[in-house]
Image (cartoon, rainbow, N blue to C red):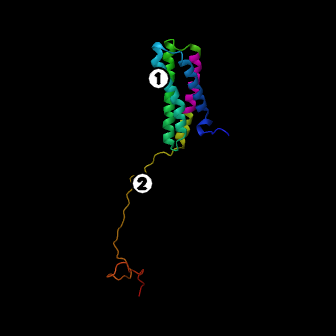
Amino acid sequence: MTEPIFDHDRLDVYRLSSEYVASSFTIAKDLNGCHRHARVQWLRAAQSIPLNIAEGNGKRSLKDRSRLLDIAGGSALECVAIQDVLAATDGLNDERHRQLKQMLYRIISMLTRLVARSDVARETATKYNAGVEYKYKYEYREAEYECDRKEPGQCVGPKTPS
């Protein structure tokens, strides 16, 4: 039996962000002491990237899709900042920091293009009939049906001209 493939599995940005999560978890295992708070925040932000990509890709509404992809991009930027802090405090070596930063740069670039594509496909907001007034003429007319008004529901149809 073949493994089911979801739409987000086909996205390069989803696969790259999953690789990034795996790399960040490997490095985070060695972080402790004064880096423990940054470690927790980093792992949350890293996991948020592929989770929001998958959720956003499953949305039918382009507005919802763009919003979730924007959140994924924000999480990626948060990871960049956390890595900078870790590198500045000797929690992350320079080579590893550079490699992970390049991955995040690619992720953010791909997300930016996906969001831009979603925004282009959306119709611009338009006010229909803005500033246009219509004058309606209302006339009251009696129905011209042959009816016995004494017995309701006994109308036969339109009155024929005599």
Rendered view: 84 above or below 77: above
Residue 51 at x, y percent in the picture: 53, 33
Q: Residue furthest front?
A: 1
Could you give the CA–CA distance between mark 1 and mark 2, rounded to whole angstroms? 50 Å
Rendered view: 34 above or below 127: above
Q: Which residue is mark 1?
A: 41
Q: Residue furthest right?
A: 1
Query: Which of 115 and 53 lies nearest the eye of the viewer?
Result: 53
Q: Is residue 135 magenta?
A: no
Which of the labelled discs sits on residue 103, or is there none?
none
Q: Which residue is mark 2?
A: 129
Task: Categorize mark 2 by other alpha carbons within 10 Å: few (<14), some (14-19), many (20+).
Answer: few
Task: Categorize mark 1 by other alpha carbons within 10 Å: few (<14), some (14-19), many (20+).
Answer: few
The residue at 45%/19% (across/down) is 37
Dot 1 lies on which element?
helix
Query: Which of 83 and 119 lies nearest the eye of the viewer?
Result: 83
Q: Residue furthest top?
A: 90
Dot 2 lies on which element?
loop
Rendered view: 153 above or below 25: below
Quadrant of residue 96 within the rendered picture = top right
Q: Where are the magenta residues, as a range?
A: 96-111
Q: How many marks?
A: 2
Name the residue type under label 2. Asn
Name the residue type under label 1. Gln
Residue 82 at x, y percent in the picture: 49, 20
The residue at 37%/64% (across/down) is 136
The residue at 49%/14% (across/down) is 32
| Quadrant location of the C terminus in the rendered image | bottom left
